[in-house]
Image (tube, rainbow, N blue to C red):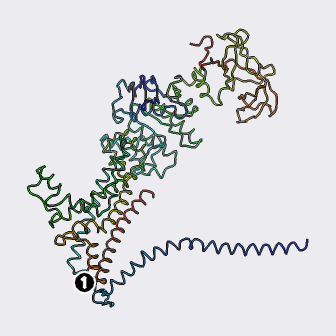
Amino acid sequence: MAPVFLKSITKAYGAFEAIHDIDLEIEDGAFVVLVGPSGCGKSTLLRMIAGLETISRGEVLIDGEVMNDVPPKHRDIAMVFQNYALYPHMTVAENMGFALRLAKVPAAEAAEKIRTSAAVLGLTDLLDRYPRQLSGGQRQRVAMGRAIVRNPKVFLFDEPLSNLDAALRMQMRVEIAELHQKLGTTMIYVTHDQVEAMTLATKIAVVNKGRLEQVASPVRLYERPQNLFVARFIGSPQMNILPARAADGGGAARLLDGSRIALPWPLPLGEDGELSVGIRPEALLIADDGALGGRVTLAEHLGGLTLVHIALTDGAPVVLQAVGAPTVAVGDLVRLRVDPAGLHLFDPDGRRIAKPGES
Amino acid sequence: MTALPSAGLAAGSRRSKRLGRRSRAERWAPLLFLLPAVVTLATVSVYPVLDGMRLSLRNTMLSTQEDEFVGLANYLRLTGDPQFWSAWQHTMLFTAASTLLETLLGMAMAVVLYETFRGRGWVRAAMLVPWAIPTVVTSKMFGWLFDGQHGVVNWLLMQAGLIDGYVNWYGDSRTALLTIIIADVWKTTPFMALLLLAGLQTVPHSLVEAARIDGAGPWQSFWSIRLPLLFTTLLIAGMFRALDAFRIFDLVYVLTGGGPADSTEVLSTLSYKVLFSGLDFGYGSALSAAMFITEAVIALGFGLFIVRRMRRDNG
């Protein structure tokens, strides 16, 4: 167990900078998820912590020690790879014991550690099998077993669930969360799936184009996205983003179709100042006195929830999430009210316009 | 309306006839496509082997016009012929030494060329030059390099203080085969390196990275991860090389002609001499047959090992 600090980390390939000056503090025992679209640099960042990529500028500290020039094997970390990277010519037990063998752990002690770890992950009956004889989920578990058997200071996960089907992914997600609760070890987890990030993390770092957009707890990230990128990236279905202008002396936002959304707090913008209005799908409510109007284009019934797709009067598409099954049909004209709790405002540069009382 | 069913029947029978024709064509077409390859192989490969076998059972001699069936007489002569056994030993020694050295050095080269460094593309291309040079040219080149009086190798070794006097490399029966092995290693190692480099590239990079995180240094990751995963490729490359080395002819023929004192005589040069200098087609064919059998045994040995290995890897 150890805290991890990234201090002004930069990765440059020649003149091209893939990672720009990232600072990140990961507390001891935290589960931090680096999330972002593919190519945003999150994997590179993880590989720099692992020691598989050199650090162009800045420092990586694990447990208070600068690790920049320390080879991976001396960083006391374990990593789970996207394709599992199991050694195909070794059995499950040999795969899990490879690190112990290299560390010259006595055979009896190593066997004991392998047995305990295998029991934790339900691998006891598979110890003599080869990776090719295992299913995807079992391979995934062996990859985790190989990591926990060494009892490292930090676990690194590089998109460990993206090769699994949806049902298995959900199951393994739960297992990883349980593993973290059981071991309490610092975990750093890379994914492009915001659902994984939201469910697993104690802290999420949203990465975009080699920069940190926001670092916060999942709930805070959802409730106070600092910019449009985070607002769009976190939450499923996506937040509805509508261009608007300030009206009524900052007391309302006027959408392109002319409708006005009254704001419970005054905008710090002049009359006609540009802004973007973000509305979470669950903050759109069907109400006869609603400020917005549109036509239903599709209703997706998910059982407990329904997603209603609506085209506003100027054609802009929005999604409404309702509990249960509201009685709407395609083609219906509906009025929509906005719950201020799910309303977010962004300035023309995409930065959040803070509500009163927000720090 | 009443005519319709019978018209339908007629159409049905026409269709079945057409289907019958098509299925006959479908049966013959694959065989037809195979025919050119079969004919070519039969004429240039199967027929010569069989005819060689037939000749080896006769005393065909062009100079005396003898041509009678003699049964296994040529093979009996072979078993008691010291020239044959000495050539057989030289061939085996050359095959074993060159295959082993070329595999080891080729592996080392492949590992270096796998890494990224400035100018790697150029080095990879340059590496193939020795292999691209015609063997006769290589032979002449090594003839001059290892020349007993004017050779640069002697001069270099003298300067380095490794030898007391000039060595008559390929003129001395103790060093002649060694010289040929060195020339062959120089020429063929790059080819091995290229085969093994291709093999190395099939080992997923993430495995090497996983090993690094597990605590393996470069040597450990080579011995524990890359080499075991490369072993089948290594065996296949080794088999090709061994079978090729066993047929060594041009290097020996140009550099030493089999001498001095038959110390570099190999099976290819010996059967060539018996066949085309001695015009003893019967005995020469028996020699060739002995070569064929030895090669078949080598191939079988490698083959069994490779198949077993592959079964283990995929079973």
Number of marks present in the image shown: 1
**Residue at the disc numbered 1:** B77
> In this view of the protein, which residue sits in the foreground, B160 or B213?
B160
Q: Is residue A302 left or right of residue A108?
A: right
Residue B315 x, y percent position in the rendering: 45, 58
Where does residue B277 sit, x and y in percent of width and height?
26, 79
In this view of the protein, which residue sits in the foreground, B265 or B19?
B265
For residue B132, side relative to residue A232 (left or right):
left
**Which residue is at the far left?**
B164
On the rendered structure, is B115 left or right of B64?
A: right
Q: What chain letter is assigned to the residue under label 1?
A: B
Nearest the eye: A137 or B268: B268
Instruction: Report x, y in % for residue B47.
Output: 42, 79
Furthest toward the top, the residue is A249
Q: Is residue A354 above or below residue A183?
A: above
* Residue B297 drawn above or below residue B194: below
Residue located 42% across and 31% down the image: A14
Q: Is residue A109 visible?
A: yes
Left or right position of B184 against A200: left
Say what amino acid the circle numbered 1 marks.
Answer: Arg
The image quarter containing residue B221 is: top left
The quarter of the displayed image where residue A249 is located: top right
Is residue A322 visible in this depiction of the protein?
no
The quadrant of the rendering that contains the N terminus of chain A is: top left
